[in-house]
Image (cartoon, helix red, strand yellow):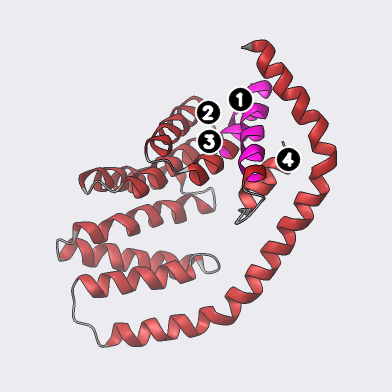
Amino acid sequence: MTNHLNQQAKLLDSLWPHCRLLILAFSLVCISQSSVAQNSSDSQLIDSLIMRLSVLELGEEKADVLYQISDVYYDFDWKNATDYAQLSLNLSKKTNYKKGELEPSNRLGELKIANGIHVSEGFEYFDRAVKLAMAKDNQEMELKALTNIALAYSLNKDFNESIRYYFLAIDLASDINDKASSAGIFGELGKVLLFYGDITLGLFYFESVLNFETENEFRNSTPANLFAISNG
């Protein structure tokens, strides 16, 4: 096993100099193009959702629209994203809309850990999201929440727990045959393993991301995957 991992690490060392600059340049172009397109439509979408919100009665549909507004704000306005997610969660609880509690719970956890200051508060929301996802047999959301818990532990520098939750997420992703999510988790796990001091295993998981992207000819690559590969 050790010899195999050493061979994998050597292979990665030989590949990085050739692909690092190309991957970084490609990822920056993708991010730039995506940002321009998104900024041009976000304002119109938010206005449309708020107009729709104004004519809805209290209930499940209104809770869903509140979450949709939060989702639009998520990438560029932390306060509004948080406020609307909280409104969605509160309304879902008030109307006993359990399905409607799931995504806002996970989203509020993500927003809490986004600035690295309120990480401890994020765990409460993620734990709630995992329980709700399991109750609804929503494995996709369970996977997201488990991955977020692993990330939160890594931000707290509790690498043992972070690694444990990343492996739980990998197992679930394998069970539902979600290869794209597996690749993203491999990249995050690789970074944690490097911090933990296991360089060989960390590079092994970075190579797994590279293999996935190569097999898919880098179609629909995420910035996180590209940076994981380039920084490995």
> What type is the residue that disc 3 sits on?
Ser
Is 104 left, or right, of 55 in this rendering? Answer: right
Which of the two discs, 4 and 2, labels the residue nearer the N terminus?
2
Question: Residue at (73%, 19%) from the top-left corner?
Answer: 7
Q: Identify the disc placed on residue 86.
A: none
C-alpha distance separating marks 4 and 2: 19 Å
Q: CA distance from mark 4 to mark 3?
A: 18 Å
Residue located beneath label 1 in the image:
196
Residue 72 lies, with reference to residue 55, above or below; the image says above
Amino acid type of the residue tagged 2 in the rendering: Phe
Residue that numbered label 4 is attached to: 231
Q: Residue furthest right?
A: 17
Q: Which residues are magenta?
A: 188-213
Q: Earlier in the sequence, mark 3 or mark 1?
A: 3
Q: Say whether disc 3 or disc 2 marks the residue closer to the N-terminus.
A: 3
Q: Is residue 3 left or right of residue 220?
A: right
Circle 3: is it few (<14), some (14-19), or many (20+) Cα within 10 Å?
many
Gap in angstroms between the C-alphas marked 3 and 2: 5 Å
Mark 1 in CB contact with mark 2 (< 8 angstroms): yes
Residue under label 3 = 154
Kind of residue indicated by mark 1: Tyr
Would you say residue 197 sits in the magenta stretch?
Answer: yes
The residue that mark 2 highlights is 159
Given residues 225 and 114, the one toward you in this image is: 225
Residue 167 screen position, x and y as percent: 45, 29
Viewer-proximal residue among 179 and 100: 179
Mark 3–mark 2 CB contact (< 8 Å)? yes
Q: Nearer the viewer, mark 4 or mark 3?
A: 4
